[in-house]
Image (cartoon, coloured by chain):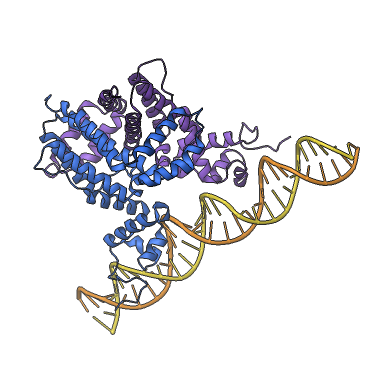
Chain colours: A purple, B blue, C yellow, D orange
DNA sequence: GTGTACGTCGTACGCCGTACTATGGTCGTA
DNA sequence: TACGACCATAGTACGGCGTACGACGTACAC
């Protein structure tokens, strides 16, 4: 019988369990709150035990990113390319909103994991089958990724998440910092945004559809 | 007379000097290489002396980001909106390529500095004067920023910078990891990309012009 | 002259990632 | 059943981090 631990599910460690708990911890406390010691505590283990499942923290972070990619829906095969790309982009945005730490990790992870590669292959396949010439498919893929990750990056850097939070912060924080004579246009747009309501999902769709439409003409030029 | 220090330019510290040296250090060693001690060493000072110019490291990072925004060209006023946005976007890409650490900092900096605000005001002004309705200007501004920062984010996560480096890594690293039967499309596009040559500046212009053209129709609908 | 305020310093504390070493339980084989 | 090998786990320790604290020189106002 195993020694009693402070965690209910004490079914022994495994790389999968370690990585999953790391993701949960990062979701809860942000990437700054993720340390090997705290992760080990959360697993009811000693700090050094983790190093039997990951070579070092870098490898742990790589594995966490790949978990994120596993959560992103692959482009469905049975529809037109725009719907397929739309689906996977929306899924990606949701996943990245759920795991905001992932964006800050992307910049420093250079070698893609298996789920990431599978994802890239599926997206490239979808674009090629839709009639994009090889290099155009590369451009389109790149642009779509830029959009998805760029959006997530900007969204993560905003100190609010909902329309209400935005309205509250606009009144209490932003507008007081923006003298109307020095920043007339920012005042105008902040006021308009408060009136209209800030809607991240809608904002995402707006730009996404613009990008998808802009890519359409590049398709038949094979 | 001041005590002799290990650094040539020993004209006394100041917040500006501290921040400038921090930027230089981050350029040279990356954001991981930037510690208060190393920064103090580079300035020929003790670690704690820095805390008379910045409240804590967070404030230092905020100030560094604002220095980056100072370097980005404001949209010129005398041309059409597309040329103006093009200029400032290209400038932003160059600046972010020069300071790759800036992108990883953006995600965690939530309150914009003065240069950042001035920049936002200028961009918003340019779009409004070009005839974008208030909310459309917001959408356009957001989309352009998504593109610029998203591009920089992706570029920073690539382990190569030039066409030659890419070609070398493709042969030595990427293709060996991609069994052709499992990843046929990625193989195809990697080969095509090696043949065509990877060109980050060109890739940036390609997507930028696509986005600018897509935004044009939103302009007159006031 | 002398008080005061400020720039700078060394030191200390509690974190971090992780190298090294020890330990105890499990299991294949005799 | 006994033993030896293995391996998951734990303990300790080291160097580096951000930074709180208090002491030291000295420039300047009176």
In percent of width and height, residue D2 lies at 90, 42
Q: Residue at x 40, y 59 (%)?
A: B36
Q: How many marks?
A: 0
Q: Is residue B218 left or right of residue B151?
A: left
Residue B18, quarter of the rendered image:
bottom left
Res. A189 in view: yes
In front here: A85 or A134? A134
In front here: B90 or B118? B90
Residue at the extreme left of the image, as rendered: B78
Q: Residue at x 11, y 26 (%)?
A: B220
Q: Residue at x 30, y 24 (%)?
A: A222
In percent of width and height, residue B219 lies at 14, 28
Q: Residue at x 27, y 23 (%)?
A: A216
In percent of width and height, residue A210 lies at 25, 26
Relative height, residue C30 to residue B5 (above, below): above
Relative height, residue D13 to residue A195 (above, below): below
Relative height, residue B95 to residue A117 (above, below): below
Residue B40, quarter of the rendered image:
bottom left
Q: Is residue A14 left or right of residue A204?
A: right
């Amino acid at each position: 019988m195993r020694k009693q631990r402070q965690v209910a599910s004490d079914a022994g460690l495994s790389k999968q369990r370690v990585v999953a708990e790391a993701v949960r911890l990062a979701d809860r406390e942000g990437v700054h709150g993720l340390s090997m010691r705290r992760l080990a505590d959360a697993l009811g283990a000693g700090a050094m035990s983790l190093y039997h499942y990951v070579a070092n923290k870098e490898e742990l972070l790589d594995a966490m990113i790949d978990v994120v990619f596993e959560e992103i829906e692959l482009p469905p095969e049975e529809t037109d390319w725009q719907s397929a790309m739309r689906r996977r982009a929306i899924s990606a945005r949701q996943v990245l909103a759920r795991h905001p730490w992932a964006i800050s990790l992307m910049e420093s992870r250079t070698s893609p994991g298996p789920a990431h590669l599978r994802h890239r292959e599926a997206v490239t396949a979808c674009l090629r089958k839709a009639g994009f010439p090889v290099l155009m498919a590369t451009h389109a893929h790149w642009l779509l990724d830029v959009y998805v990750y760029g959006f997530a990056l900007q969204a993560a850097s905003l100190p609010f998440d909902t329309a209400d939070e935005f309205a509250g912060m606009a009144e209490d924080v932003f507008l007081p910092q923006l003298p109307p004579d020095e920043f007339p246009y920012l005042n105008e747009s902040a006021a308009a945004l408060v009136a209209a309501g800030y809607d991240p999902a809608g904002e995402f769709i707006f730009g996404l559809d613009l990008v998808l439409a802009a890519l359409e003409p590049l398709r038949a030029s094979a």
